[in-house]
Amino acid sequence: MGQELDPQISDLKKFAKEKGFGQYKIIETKESGLINFKNREGTNTLFEFLKTNPDYNTVICTEMSRLGRTEADLHIIKDWFIKNKIQFFLKDRQYQLFDDKYRLNDSAAFSFTFYGYIAESEMRTKKERFKRAKIYWNGMGVSLSGKLLFGYKKVPYDNKRNTYAIDENQAEEIQKIFHWYAYGIDISCPNPSIKDIVLHCIKKGFSNYTHIKRNVNKLLKEEAYLGFKTTNNKRKNPYFTTDGDEPKYITTNTEIKYPIILNRALFEAVQAKLKTNNTRAEKSTKHTTILSKLIECPGCHRFLGGDYVNKKAEGLRYGYRCLATRNIIKCSYTKHFSMQMLDSTIWSTIKSDLYLLSKEIFENNPDNILKTLKEEEENLKKRQWTLEEKFKMELISYEKIRSMRNFNVEEHLKKFKLNIDRLDAEKRIVDQELNSITVKRKMLEEEKIHNYEEIIKNNIEKIENDKALLKYYTSLYISGIKILYQGVKHTILEITFKKVSTDFNRSWRHAAKHLGDLPLEKKIYLLIDKTITLNIQIRKITRMFTIENGNIIMSQNTFGIKKNVSFSFEEITVPNEKTQEKLNDLLIGPYERSFQELFTPIEYTKLDLYPKR
């Protein structure tokens, strides 16, 4: 609150005339009483003026607190007045320091000290009163000072104070960000990292505040959105000295009321996920790992992660392995799986049934998808332009600083490099996402979205050359992958689907209902034959089995008689007459099926997206 000085000046002029003074110098200051003596600009100006203008030898104040706010400060000023023979009048107390003959008596000196004590006491009382009032009004959500919190706007309250009101647009963005982090952005990003959310905010054209990872991280922890927040403000102590007892900073804790934006259940769901460090989130900023957070570790049942190691002797090694082997409580499962082989196998399986993929696009309303993609593309282009402008400003700023005197090359070059690297990293992410969205949009625009299956078939090459697109399509309907067997020549995977189309495994669905031993509409098995590296074979198994001594054992209970039949991996991958005979012996009557129905071959498509060794 500002101090009105005009009435005080008018009263002081009148008082000066009564004392016989016709010429005077007005020294105004609106400094806080918290400023110490050395830093009081008004007091220093007064001393300097009196030193350089010896004809002026009298100081008049309305009250003692206008001269100084503490006894210590006032004693310094009093001693300076006495030393320099400066008369002092305190108008409101009808007090003067020297008598008319510039003599100082004990009573005047004591009175000065007494009035100084009263001034300091009044200031302490006033500060306590202000503090209590601030706590009260903050608790009521009124008279809020400081930086405006994202999600709110300041509005007038009783013409003297302000309060917070919800900024509806920002509040909606906050609610969406919390929901995304707790429950996933969409089917392609069910467990987003903060980086994922920032990128999505950019694509959706959210406020610039949400385009920075640090801000989103802070936003997700902001308790004010629940209605109340306890501040831990720290400010410099004006009375701090290196040789004194005063602390350098003063810390205050104030409870402030805010309009409610979030419900507690959603807020706590986000806090719980933040504490677990979001172990299912894709954290790599350098690589797109197609099957990350999908393959379950056979040892600890966590997820296998992308393992990218550049060894001088072997070159770049890329694969899947359990990253918990580096934890304090280590996983004992140390096997390494070829990334190219697993990615290619899963994509080959998806590619064998394009009907489901086209069905997914259809069910998600392609017209709306196209509109959304166009909006996201425009927002990414805007962010791209913003980053380019920031890059230019960094260059201009660096050039200006470099031309200044006393330029510290090493310090500023280091800071400049950090800023440029940060902008460059963000721009690479935006560029990559923009390219991916542009490809998706063009795919949907082609052929006017009439034949969804044809669109995918016509654009298979584009998909197979973009890891981000492959990851997107894989996540559309695969929810989990288990490794049941891993050997030198063979690998067996269990694939769990989110959805299965009506055409998927059509040939065996009828029999599966009678057999009743598999939820086959959600699960299949893949036998991968790696005997010849350049000619990998895949067989899709659509019936339950167990693995014993490198053999697949299938069972069937027919007319109360249980039969077990053993198939070697080779008998399945390279079938012969004996294989069909075993199958006929197992599945008779209504359960009879051909080998091709039970062990369906899948054409292996080798993805060429990996650096050469």
Image: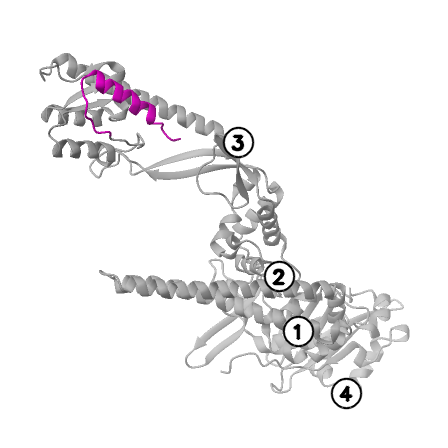
Q: Residue at x 53, y 41 (%)?
A: 153
Mark 1 vs mark 3: which is more N-terminal?
3
CB atoms of marks 1 and 2 within 8 Å: no
Residues under labels 1 and 2: Cα distance? 21 Å
Q: In the rendered view, does 539 fall on the left or right side of 295? A: right
Residues under labels 2 and 4: Cα distance? 44 Å
Mark 4 vs mark 1: which is more N-terminal?
1
Residues under labels 1 and 3: Cα distance? 53 Å
- SS assignment at label 3: strand
Q: Nearer the viewer, residue 123 or 548?
A: 123
Residues under labels 3 and 2: Cα distance? 44 Å
Q: Residue at x 78, y 83 (%)?
A: 579
Q: Closer to the camera: disc 2 or disc 4? A: 2
- SS assignment at label 2: loop
Q: Quadrant of residue 464?
A: bottom right
User: Which kind of residue does numbered mark 3 sit on?
Assistant: Tyr
